[in-house]
Amino acid sequence: MSFLLPCPNCGRRSVYEFRFGGEVRPVPAVDALHAEWQNYRFNRTNAAGVQTEWWFHRSGCRQWLYAVRNTLTNEVLDAYLPGEKP
Amino acid sequence: MNFLFQGHAVEAKDGDTIAAALYRNGQRTFSRSFKYHRPRGLLCVAGKCPNCLMNVDGIPNIRTCITSVRDGMRVKAQNVFPSLETDWLSITQRFAWLMPVGWYYKTFTHRTSWHAVEPFIRKVAGLGEVLTTESRSYEHSWLHCDRAVIGGGWAGIEAAQAAGARGEQVVLVDDQPELGGQSRYRKRGGKVPSDLIERLQALPNVRILLDSYCFGLYEGNLLGIVQRNPHPGAVERLVHLRAEHTTVTTGAYETPLLFPNHDLPGVMLSTGVLRLLHLYGIQAGKRAVVVGARGATEEISAELRDAGIQVMATVSAEQVRTVTGSASVKGIQTEVGRFACDLIAVCGLEVPDAGLAVQAGGKLSWSAAHGMFLPTGLPKHVSLLGAAAGEGLRANVSIPLPPSKRAFVCLCSDVSSQDLCDGVAEGFDHIETLKRYTTTTMGPCQGRMCQLSAIGVCAHETGRSTAEIGVTTSRPPSPGVTLGALAGSGHNPIRRTPMHYAHEKLGVVWMDMSDWRRPRYYRTSPAFAEKECIQAEYRAVREAVGIIDVSTLGKLALRGADCGKLLDKVYTHRFSDLPPGRVRYALMCDEGGVILDDGTIARLGDDRYFITTTTGNLEFVQQWLDWYLAGTGWDVHIANVTAGYGAMNIAGPRSREVLSKLTHCDLASPAFPYMACREAEVGAIPVVMLRIGFVGETGWEIHCPAESAEGLWEALLEAGQESKIRPFGVEAQRLLRLEKRHVIVGVDTDALTNPYEADLAWAVKLEKPDFVGKACLSRAAVDLSRERLIGFVLRGPGLPQDGAAIVADGELAGRVTSTRHSPARQAAVGLGWVKVAQAKEGMTINVRVDGKLVPATITMQPFYDPEGGRLRQ
């Protein structure tokens, strides 16, 4: 794990500067079924391929951002701030 | 220069490596082999083989052939008894038949038998001894460049020169003390002109790292480089080099040919002979026999004759019957006759050193045209040039096999060709399984000396082609790296509060809390024991007034119209309706309802809030707030002001009389009630005052600019002299809070605790439409099946330890989380977890104290001032 992550604010940086925040998933509604909440809390898609993830640039701009990463190659295809893209 | 070898002084010339100096002084045996203790001498003289590993200044496994001599260094042989020349353990050779391949697996099939022999085997076999006390210092550095060139031979110099001329930022790395690669010691290929090297050195955008080796190429073109002796203060420097493009010009190395006794001292690779000759001016012998394929032998013979070494004969490896001599070479028996000699120069197979290319994602495949394994499928950011790509190397026709099966393929762990044949016969016929079963290619040389021979034997025994057999995987680090270099300098930051030096004047005893140093207690006189000091601090708070430094609390300043919205979402309590000038306890849970952190939130103005977090959780809490804010577009700005503010808590029945001396702010309860906050001046310093009571007495938590904190601390101590003020530390604070039954998150709670279990239900507002954890907390509110946090008062002597067992009805019922002896109750009190059925006021449980069960009474009330009247005075 020593790939570079293109931070939208700071440019390409070593992944060691970031904290991983997990895959981006829709949060269930507050009154959703308990099973739905259990699924949200304990299960992960764990995609073998491209997925969108949360990352926090801890030793940089200290912003949360989305990164689109191929989990097989660690290639980061895109990175953007929440609210900037669909 | 002089150094000590086995306790005797050895003279070295300028530029000598340890091995060169020893060889010049007549040393021929440099090590004893791993298993059979066979004598081994210099072979590659390039740091590629295991033969010259020694202990240097206490550090084991130093490759002496590439380590320069320093004046006064102490060098010792490894794994010999009693000496290199006479090693009694070489008797093990006679019992080789008892130790076939897979000996351990076959012989020590029972666990106990292995335990019985393991200490003996560890003594007899193996390498150096680990140094358990390391006093040398290491460091790390980071470099970035457009192009990294690994290897400073012809190809590397040209690549660096070309890239430098294009204006690229270049780093050129070479493991030798000088650039030039093989042109420094052999005529083939020609000498690199010195003006080319000078022009390269003159380029400002080219940085040259000499005496530095690259041990791995990692993801994202990150290169690990160890620089030896970067300056007198450090023994090694680990350089993290990040390159846009890596050019691998690591050249090629020579590997041995197999024939009986080919591992005897005096049998040396031809490049080793040339290195000794041209780099150190040493004749490796007087009379030499050259072994190898025609073409290669002619080049070497010519070089040897030029240097005045007599060449007795030139033979091919297949013609060799055996090498004679016991401690070193005396002669050679071949199909074309016997020759007396003291040196056998082996022109071995040349192997491109392409490990970095493989680590980058390339594959090694057999090129029949070159007769060697060459990397293919390199990623875009890595290129391979020169001998590492097979350029200019002699084509190897095939991998020759030993005529006798008792030739050592693996020099590192004494694996013979017979062992490999047996391994294949036993079913380990894949090169990867054969490697693991026999341990060949797994020693310190990392397969450099034995890989090709092992492939050759495997191919012959299985009847498959070299291409089908393939190679084992090359992984970093290669060559090996010291743990010291990887660990670096062992930098431990310490955070000091603004009042740090004031505490020192007061006789503080420190404790570490994450990075912070906090006063544990104050030893006002050397005559007082810890217990007496803490009790005096406790009494001061309960009876007069005490003051504690709480600057380590995490402090966040929030500003913006939507702060209330964010806090309502993230904390369990409601904060949007908190009136300015009021404070509320703040509890944070995750989506599963598990308690993450607690603190206080003060509303300073309509759109200004001030949050405190626990000391260790600040970073987490800030990220958590930021995460819920991300993408919302809400008007909230969060600033971490932890280091900007000093903080102290002045508490006790006389705290008001002390504080009022320094401020005009009305401190009387009607004007400044419990759980209120004010921005005011104390001693002309602007402060935020929170009237809260962690310790259970009337008190104020005062936050002020860090630069004024020490002055305010001292002013308060002075103003409090008449009132018998006393500074108190974390130990007294923990006792005071425990008597008030205040929970410490992470001590009294764990990774599963929800607020209902921890008796903090009052801090959860389920009627809020939505907040983090609501879905799960709504269930937890009605699910009473789990444990409850209870308080207990011990009804006997002694003090249970944290974590002690709680027993009820003869069964384990829970555990203790915090205990102290309470002066207020004159008994040991504590917090602990029990099953819900047992968590009833007045119920008796048993707590384990010093191995005995002592009865205790459960209470759900604070141990001290249960009504909280003292807080509100």
Image: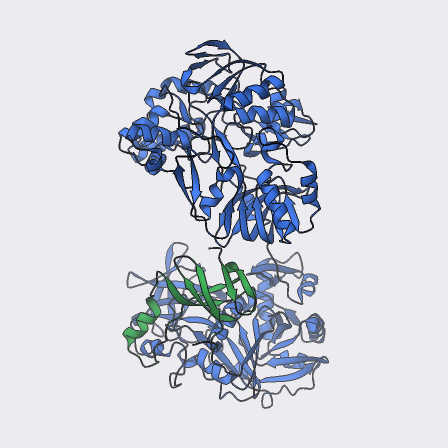
Chain colours: A green, B blue
Location of residue B797 in the rendering, given as x and y in whole percent from the top left corner: 44, 61
The C terminus of chain B sits in image quarter: bottom right
Location of residue B869 in the rendering, given as x and y in whole percent from the top left corner: 51, 83
* Closer-to-camera residue (B734/B587): B587
Q: Count the numbered circles shown.
A: 0
Q: Is residue B789 left or right of B529 when viewed as pictured? A: left
Residue sticking out furthest to the front: B369
Residue sticking out furthest to the bottom: B670
* Closer-to-camera residue (B471/B754): B471
The N terminus of chain B sits in image quarter: top right
Residue B315 in view here: yes
Location of residue B794 in the rendering, given as x and y in whole percent from the top left corner: 41, 65
Q: Determine whether B392 is above or below B33 in the image.
A: below
Location of residue B561 in the rendering, given as x and y in whole percent from the top left corner: 54, 86
* Closer-to-camera residue (B65/B780): B65
Q: Residue A43 lies in what quarter of the image?
A: bottom left
Q: Residue B750 lies in what quarter of the image?
A: bottom left
Residue at 38%, 86% (x, y): give it: B767
Residue at 60%, 53% (x, y): give it: B142
Residue B479 in view here: no
* Closer-to-camera residue (B681/B818): B681
Q: Determine whether B443 is above or below B202 in the image.
A: above
